[in-house]
Image (cartoon, coloured by chain):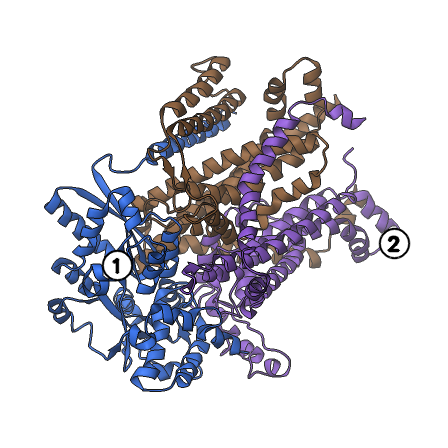
Chain colours: A blue, B brown, C purple
Amino acid sequence: MTSLRFIINTSLMLALASIVGCFGGSKRGSDDGVIEIVNASYDPTRELYQEINAAFIDDYQQKHGKTVKVTQSHGGSGSQARSVIDGLEADVVTLALAGDINAIAKKQLIAADWEKRLPDNSAPYTSTIVFVVRDGNPKAIKDWDDLAKPGVKVITPNPKISGGARWNFLAAWGYVTLHKKGSDAEAQDLVGRIYRNVVKLDTGARGSAQTFIKNKLGDVFISWENEAILAQREVPDQKLAIIYPSASILAEPAVAVVAQNVDERGTRAVAEAYLQFLYTDAAQDIIGKNTYRPRNATYQKKYAATLPTIPLFTIREVAGGWAEAQQRFFSDGGVFDRIFSLKK
Amino acid sequence: MEFNKSVREDPWYLRVPLILFSVLFIGIMVIGPMVNVFAQGLELGLGVAFAAMAHPHALHALQLTLTAAVIAIVLNVTFGIAVAWAIARFRFRGKAVLTSLIDLPFSVSPVIAGLIFVLLFGAYGFIGPLELSPVAQRIGNTIILGFVGLVLAWLNSEFNLLSFAFRPRWARLILVLGFAGLGCIQPVTDLDRIQIVFAVPGVVLATAFVTFPFVARELIPVMEAIGPEEEEAARTLGASGWQMFWYVTLPNMKWGLLYGVLLCNARAIGEFGAVNVVSGKLAGRTDTLPIYIEKLYQGFGAVQTASAFAISSLLCCLALLTLVFKTYLEWKNRQYLLEQVKKGAS
Amino acid sequence: MAGQKRRALPGFGLSLGYSLFYLSVLVLIPLAGCFIKASNLSWEQFWHAVSDPVAVAAYQLSFSTSIIAALLNSFTGLIVAWVLVRYDFPGKKLLDALIDLPLALPTAVAGITFANLYGSEGWFGQHLMFLDPDGFVGHWFSEDGWFGSTLFTLDTRARGGPLAIVVVLMFVGIPFVIRSVQPVLAEFEIAQEEAAVSLGASRWQTFRYVILPALLPAWLTGLALAYARGLGEYGSVIFVADGIPGKTLIPPVLIIAKLEEFDHARGAFKYEEAAAIASVVLTMSFITLVLINLLERWSKKFEPSEA
């Protein structure tokens, strides 16, 4: 009986400690002089913002003598936008595409002219869409057409959920309509055949990367350039190769301050400084190092070896803008839905 | 005797394959995956595994997971006792419907469980974030912590934990009043606006929802099996309602109660789908262990994968511990019931 | 009379009142919110959302994999319960205790482990490559294979496909059938078996006509519980399923996809449609639940009286 009493006694103490800890720990704010901001971002930026946050915290400490803490939240770009609309207390959003920030702006949480508030349409870095293939490129993938060949297993996330996946989809579409000057029907044919080759549609870019790398599924993974290079570096033993198609899309992940949240919490100054910091030399260097494409010409040159120049078209050229792209390609009964309902 | 045996004894050509099949089935379906978790977690050695567990975000996730589990257990134990008392001791119309409704969260897909709380407490939800006056906060705290004191007081009187310092009656008074007083002094938050979804309360609510049926489902059959005779006797002997509850009902149901708590705890610690929808995934703030594991699993490189499996092993150990405790409780309960039967016979 | 006597105990109003309050606040009101949200749609919009071919395929996938996993579990569960009750062998206690592991193990952990185990380099997956479309069994069932081209095609892959979902659902459902059947089998009166044997029944006849009917209610309850558990499962399936719309996409993922779909024309996310699909799934699970409860009540008639 004494052993039972001991077990119950210990577990009681643990329960007590956790309750007290919870009540003590749930207080937050700027009591201890630390200003906390929350950055809601999309999946692949985990490593990038880890480094940028550290640099920003030092920088802000030096310039303003205040300690800042940046809490990250990562998820699918669309899911993050929805969470912010539903009340996720993010001070800044750094999402995969402007369309998702527009969605938040429509609910008046972000200023309507957010794109003009920062240089380069509020997109401090860009990227593009490339292919990752296995050691030696056994299926001889060179361009978008090769993805549609029978028997090629393609990995890409679900464009209805993931922001990166939308860039993938639009890159393939733009390749036909802009680069090859083909018709919409031809584009639909090629994109349809590519997506019918997809063997796993994950819910996010990171999920797809793990499917390709850890579960070794598929012959080619359509990916963010930065994810592709990161994967190649982090998993050297798989000897993954990166294939640049003859043309791809200029992906412009965008950033904005969530006006309503920063005004409520009094963090506007820090939040704005944080986004402006992304355009500084220090941050642009980190951006290039993390294999995103910097906006700053100096750092573009510095990282030109890892980030080669290829013909890139923009979302405006492909579809006119995000609202149109969303409506035409990814809404109910849109092009993407038709690809999967045609399939028998 | 020999006749008995031969009736049930299956021939070896039946027995051996069946045993082999069972062992193989459980081996492939249960033991294989479990061993795999540990093997993957230790692939890069113990150092990596411990480093993964000692990461501040992992520790915070552990704390949040346990906190949510404890609160969910407290809420569901209260409900379980109340509903078991009503169902097992009284007849009323709609009892069958109530019994079905208790099971409802069991079959609701966790994603839907998360979704409903977003629909309710999201910024554009039916209710939205809660606005609380300071007085309301303190009243709420007093009730919650007072209740915690009540549970501790029961545990104390049942297992006599504080006997070294206080007499039982004083201990009970101190625990209840002390905790209630603590709630009066210490507000839960400094904010007058309580964010529910994408914050800790949402995680707690979602956890409480998915673990809703466990305690009640365990207690109802236990209460029905025990029957009302002892309680009626206590009443006839002049016990007040609370005295009867305190000295007869609770001690009678204690093993069933602990068993329900155990199941509730296991599910609470492991909940993924519902918490995933409501947590907002703020690193070091609203990440629970399963969500933190998913994050690690999605990282590149062998270290991240090994870390994900190392923390999974931690949860696996918790699960195994639960099983050990459960086996112990079942044994204890059987002994208790045997005692009762003996008592009844004599 | 008994009713009168029972009322002598106190606390009926308090306990029932509190139960109903808590039930309403935590379960009923939030669930009602889902239906209310869905009711913002017109009937045509609702029907359009829930009868979308991708959605229908998702319900079918969820129901078929759950029922197959539950059926498989019901047979293996019966055997394991039989072995645990009737036979003695070393390690039996351990086996018995491990049966409950799927209840205690977080589903996300189960998900990543199964994805790892059955991956092409996993412990099991590397030996199951013959199930892939390029492997001999997989090819046989594929469009080009004999079975696939003459009868119907079947996705036999050990990972990502319906089979993988069935396997992981079997894992989460293991305890239910075993734990339902085990106590009934353990308490089965030996006298009945002796009677059957003395009347000249063979062992198989004794099992078929004496033991099995007595087990049936508990067996069905276990099956139904395993089925309900599979229907609601998300955490583990999300890690193993491919998520191809119309093929391996489960309803919860579809609900999340709907949530994430921004309708720029209306300037809002499609919450109503997500709620519509959710309410269909909810209604179906509730029907399952009512059936389980009816089954349990029916099975109580078979139980020997406690006294």
Whether the residues at callouts 1 and 2 have beta carbons within 8 Å, the answer is: no
Residue on which disc 1 sits:
A114
Residue B41 versus residue B103: which sits nearer the camera? B103
At label 2, the amino acid type is: Gly
The dot on residue C180 is none
Q: From the viewer's perspective, tell me whether residue B93 is left or right of residue B102.
A: right
Q: 10 Å neighbourhood of mark 2: few (<14), some, or many (≥20)? A: few
Q: Residue C57, image x and y in percent?
A: 57, 68
- The quadrant of the rendering that contains the N terminus of chain B is top right
Q: Residue B252, image x and y in percent?
A: 63, 26
Q: Is residue B32 shown above or below A293?
A: above
Q: Residue at x 52, y 78 (%)?
A: A342
Q: Residue at x 87, y 49 (%)?
A: C198
Q: Is residue C182 shown above or below A311?
A: above
Q: Residue A22, image x and y in percent?
A: 37, 35
Q: Quadrant of residue C49?
A: bottom right
Q: Is residue A271 shown above or below A251?
A: above
At label 1, the amino acid type is: Trp
Q: Residue at x 43, y 22 (%)?
A: B180
Are labels 1 and 2 assigned to the same chain?
Answer: no
Q: Chain of mark 1?
A: A
Q: Secondary structure at mark 2?
A: loop
Q: From the viewer's perspective, tell me whether residue A292 is left or right of residue B110.
A: left
Residue on which disc 2 sits:
C200
Q: Residue A339, image x and y in percent?
A: 47, 76
